[in-house]
Image (cartoon, grey):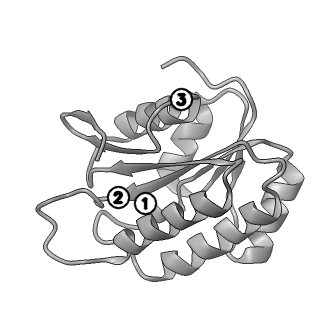
Amino acid sequence: VEAVNSPCLVIGQGTIAEAICSSAKAAIHANLQSYGAADFDHALETSGVDSVVLVRAVEESDGEIPGERLQELLDFLQAVHRRASTLRRIVILTKGNYDTQRANFDASAALVGMVRSARLELQKTEIKMLDIEPLLPVRLIVEATLQVLMDPVGELEVACISKGRRVP
């Protein structure tokens, strides 16, 4: 995948966020101490970018997304709303939303609904979602993320599984 040359902000901690930043030449890594509204506002305001990748929802485990990620996503989307005039593209990573073998409902399904609602409110900001299969290698996650970030007319929701990309 060719490197992303325009500045983008990568919000998150851990190996996925670090790998995306090392693969995207102009990426700014926002390794926040906390993930509240003020933290997102500050990161968006000081970065001066027009593209953002939110990795936070996929970081903590290989299992279900915990419910507190809903509040973080809401805070993030509200911060994006306040800066909608300057933000062109958002990519939000989720995990396991389109896994038909998933035994339990988790917060990730609610994340999808919140993002779809935000698209209606923020029509000038392109909000894309990339759902990754649990336990997918980091290299494939990074490649899929950069493809979604760089594709100006691609699908708004893509699932990246071990067998390739799927459009749900």
Determine whether the residue tagged by mark 2 lies in a helix, strand or loop. strand
Crowd class of label 1 (few under 14; some 14 to 19; many from 20; radius 10 Å): many
Do the residues bearing badges 2 and 3 touch, measured as CB atoms within 8 Å?
no
Q: Is residue 35 left or right of residue 18?
A: right
Residue at the spot of label 3: 153
Residue 141 x %, y %: 39, 40
Amino acid bearing label 2: Lys
Task: Calculate the distance from the C-alpha at mark 2 to the C-alpha at mark 1.
Answer: 6 Å
- Residue 35 visible to an observer of this rendering: no
Location of residue 163 (image quadrant): top left
Q: Position of residue 72 (x, y in %)?
A: 59, 75
**Residue occupying image coordinates x 62% and y 30%:** 24
Structural distance between the alpha carbons of marks 2 and 3: 23 Å
Callout 2 crowding tier (Cα within 10 Å): few <14, some 14–19, many ≥20: many
Q: Earlier in the sequence, mark 2 or mark 3?
A: 2
Residue 125's tag is none
- Measured from the top left, where is residue 71 in percent x and y? 57, 80
**Relative to residue 74, is residue 102 drawn left or right?**
left
Q: Which mark is residue 58?
A: 1
Q: Are marks 2 and 1 in contact (CB under 8 Å)?
A: yes
Q: Write down the residue under mark 2.
A: 95
Callout 1–callout 3 Cβ contact below 8 Å: no
Q: Earlier in the sequence, mark 2 or mark 1?
A: 1
Residue at 30% across / 63% down in the picture? Answer: 62
Q: Secondary structure at mark 1?
A: helix
In the foreground, 165 or 26? 165
